[in-house]
């Protein structure tokens, strides 16, 4: 068996492995995405909870200030009932009115802060619902990953055994090249020779679709111990059995 045949066998198993793993990989990506959104919701919930505490503290401060002013007004009223001169009474009355205005200011501020509190409470309630829903999605995604890994475990083991057997007769140098191309082209390490016009000897690389000189095609068909690469994309070339039968003389196979 030529090195091209060996690599094609290895490539076929690798593609099956890649397809099998892609199912779990896709589920893992969905899990990561749902976890990220859950973390965002939880972070937003924490930030809103802090804002709510601050707003509630402001309400309490304004209420305390208003109560303090009311106590001052009551004190002034008691004093007014004991004064003997109109001048003193008028002065106290001015201060009472001033304190009433101060109290009204605190009451208005309290109403405004209470509006903020109610809005934050509503936002927290809605976000809590979204967070619970997102947490359920995370649990579902985690279950999908766990079940997916369990389902393909035996198949992965079998395919890995096949891969080891397919890789065994290939030289380390060729395997290193193959692995490099696998990484570089996201699993697409090989390019199949495609025949465009046999009479004109026009052939292309099935990976990059660039033209292949007939000498490169012949080298791919006849080289048994070394890989032949596309001069354009550098992928390892291989030919289908039908093309080999059509182009290679019987005695050279």
Image (tube, rainbow, N blue to C red):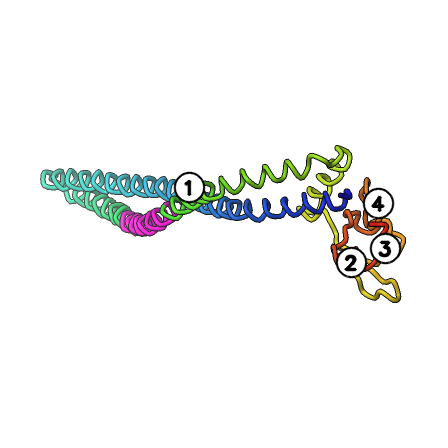
Q: Marks 4 and 3, Cα distance to the nearest angstrom?
A: 14 Å
Task: Classify mark 3: residues with Cα within 10 Å, few (<14), some (14-19) or many (20+).
Answer: few
Q: Which residue is mark 2?
A: 243
Considering the numbered disc 1 on the image, is that residue within a helix, a strand or a loop? helix
Q: Check if residue 198 falls in the magenta segment.
A: no
- Highlighted range, magenta: 109-135
Residue drawn at x 39%, y 48% is 137
Q: Which mark is residue 43?
A: 1
Precedes in sequence: disc 1 or disc 4: 1
Q: Marks 1 and 3, Cα distance to the nearest angstrom?
A: 70 Å
Picture mark count = 4
Task: From the image, state whether disc 1 or disc 3 is nearer to you.
Answer: 3
Precedes in sequence: disc 1 or disc 2: 1
Q: Which residue is mark 3?
A: 249
Left-right relation of 17 to 94: right
Residue drawn at x 38%, y 40% is 46
Give the percent coordinates (x, y) of residue 245. 79, 57
Q: Quadrant of residue 63?
A: top left
Q: Which residue is mark 4?
A: 223
Whether residue 76 is visible: yes
Task: Classify mark 4: residues with Cα within 10 Å, few (<14), some (14-19) or many (20+).
Answer: few
Give 121 or 61, whichever is nearer the viewer: 121
Task: Classify mark 2: residues with Cα within 10 Å, few (<14), some (14-19) or many (20+).
Answer: some
Give the percent coordinates (x, y) of residue 109. 30, 48
Q: Marks 2 and 4, Cα distance to the nearest angstrom?
A: 15 Å
Q: Quadrant of the N terminus?
A: top right
Precedes in sequence: disc 4 or disc 3: 4
Precedes in sequence: disc 1 or disc 3: 1
Left-right relation of 87 to 54: left
Q: Check if residue 119 falls in the magenta segment.
A: yes
């Amino acid at each position: 068996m030529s090195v091209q045949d060996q690599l094609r066998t290895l490539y076929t198993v690798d593609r099956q492995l890649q397809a099998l793993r892609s199912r779990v990989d896709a589920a893992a990506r969905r899990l990561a995405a749902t976890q990220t959104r859950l973390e965002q919701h939880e972070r937003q919930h924490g930030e809103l909870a802090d804002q709510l505490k601050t707003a509630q503290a402001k309400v309490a401060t304004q209420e305390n200030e208003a109560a303090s002013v009311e106590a001052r007004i009551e004190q002034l009223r008691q004093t007014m009932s004991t004064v003997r001169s109109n001048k003193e009474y008028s002065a106290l009355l001015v201060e009472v009115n001033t304190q009433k205005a101060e109290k009204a200011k605190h009451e208005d501020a309290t109403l405004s802060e209470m509006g903020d509190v109610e809005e934050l409470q509503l936002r927290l309630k809605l976000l809590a619902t979204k967070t619970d829903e997102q947490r359920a999605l995370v649990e579902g995604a985690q279950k999908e990953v766990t079940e997916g890994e369990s389902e393909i475990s035996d198949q992965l083991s079998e395919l890995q055994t096949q891969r080891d057997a397919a890789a065994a007769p290939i030289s380390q140098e060729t395997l290193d090249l193959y692995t490099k191309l696998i990484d570089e082209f996201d699993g697409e390490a090989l390019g199949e020779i495609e025949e465009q016009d046999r009479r004109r000897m026009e052939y292309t690389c099935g990976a990059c679709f660039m033209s292949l000189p007939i000498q490169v095609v012949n080298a791919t068909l006849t080289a048994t111990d070394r890989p032949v690469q596309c001069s354009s994309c550098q992928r390892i070339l291989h030919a289908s059995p039908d093309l080999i039968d059509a182009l290679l003389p019987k005695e050279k196979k």
